[in-house]
Image: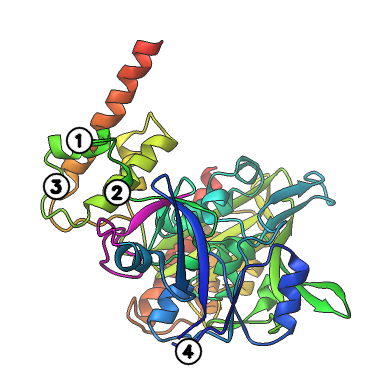
Amino acid sequence: MSVKINLDFTLNGRPVTIEVPAEMTVLNLLRDGLDLKGTKYACGEGECGACTIEVDGRTINSCLMMAADLQGRAVMTIEGMQEGHALHPMQQAFVDHGAVQCGFCMPGMIIQANYLVKQNPQLTREEMKRGLEGNICRCTGYTKVLDAVAAVVGLNENKGLEHG
Amino acid sequence: MSEIERYIAPKKLDDALEALAGGPVTIVAGATDLTPQITGGKLSYKATLMNIQHIEGLNAVTKKGGTKKDGKIRIGALVTVSEIRGNHMLKNHAGILCQAADHFASEQIRNAATIGGNICNASPAGDMIIPFLALGASAELARWQDGSIETRSVPLDEFFTGPGRNMARDDELLTAVTFDVPPENSIGLFRKSGPRPALEISTVSMGISGELTEGTLKNVRVAFGAVGPTALRGKLTEAALEGKILNQEVIQAAALAARKDVSPIDDIRATKWYRTHLIGVFTEELLNNVCQN
């Protein structure tokens, strides 16, 4: 066995202390070590985006990141998006627009879409496509995914108007 | 996969270099290339795994001096591809880097992948290598020698020695990439090819930079990717362009020279014939774009 490392980091707003093998990936830690099965394993090489999570406010492929590198960082997974019993607006938009079929790519897709809107609240449809390039869905054909993200962007615009 | 006996994440460059001097070390930063190489069985861990992400002073993009001869741009090894893509100073002075970053893998990978990693992996198809070669950049290598840091600078066109191989010694760490601030009248264009615009290992890639004065190109640098054992400078293409007025005759001659500059192979992504053909097409296309601008 490889050497083990003591980690302290924040997961969905809560502190976590855990010992991990040096070669473990973040995805393995989340799914097998912490029993958070929302983040999916698909390609395992950064091509499909199913394992997308946010680390220190930036999205990454958790299948590529080493768990050891989480020391001191803040992680958000799909489980951390829900606000109490209510779905996050991005989750709700995916439901409302029928963006989900088999659902396997959805956690990564929603995390990435939410990140894009946080980066640029006035995201255009073209920018959504560019930003979601790293998330592969094999059933929806993406149109409804884009509709869902566009709806959230529209929501933000309305909010902006109210405040203005 | 062999066992990792020690994991370290130094904050100081001194400590990192001392560790490198002390024995076999696997260096990791963004891990976007390392992890697939490990899980795919291409690489195995050495006894020490060193995470360099926390080393201070390796994550900045800085510019000293202006566009005259004294100006230098320094990009720390830990700067991510996303940071390059969004950097306004680089957009103004070395836009070719931002063009290459824009079509690098995916957002998630750009957020993690570092410049140092992309260069040290020494892939013949490494997308960030091409603009750096076109900018005439050098790799800054540091090592621990007699109780202090010793650095040397290696021009990138001498740095790559084969697929996945480079000039860095086992005790050296790539700390930055540096290049002269291109003069005001500089042009820089990058182009890559693959079946999809995203997450594509380039079938071929190309970069060109130079100074354009009244239709004449000077100090031309041309770089090609995925058409040889390493990313390479197109010396024949450069000679065909240097000091010439950019007209159709010169562009055709450059496209012909470009085909001679490259020595691609047949592989899973394309044939030797297609790659050679595409290099000619890209040369023509990029030079026509230079004319139009």
10 Å neighbourhood of mark 4: few (<14), some, or many (≥20)? few
Q: Secondary structure at mark 2?
A: helix
Q: Chain of mark 4?
A: B
- Residue A98, compared with residue A104, is above or below; it is above
Q: Chain of mark 3?
A: A
Sequence order check, earlier mark of 3 and 2: 2
Can you identify the residue that label 4 sits on? B2
Residue at the image point whose x is 77% and y is 45% from the top: B67
| Protein chain holding label 2 | A
Magenta-highlighted residues: A35-55
Q: Quarter holding the C terminus of chain A?
A: top left
Residue in the picture at 68% in, 84% down: B170
Magenta highlight on residue B11: no
Q: Is residue A77 left or right of residue A86?
A: right
Classify residue B200 by image quadrant: bottom left
Have a look at marks 3 and 4 and say if they share a chain: no
Q: Can you tell which of label 3 and label 1 is closer to the viewer?
A: 1
Report x, y in % for residue B148: 87, 73
- Left or right, A119 with reference to B174: left
Compare residues B229 and B215 and report the one nearer the observer.
Answer: B229
Q: Is residue A45 magenta?
A: yes
Q: Which residue is mark 3?
A: A100
Q: Which mark is residue A78?
A: 2
Left or right of B55 in this view: B247: left
As helix, strand or loop, the secondary structure at mark 4 comes to: loop
Inspect the image, locate mark 4, and give the three-letter code of the amino acid beneath it.
Ser
Residue drawn at x 28%, y 24% as measured from the top left: A155
Secondary structure that dominates the magenta span? loop
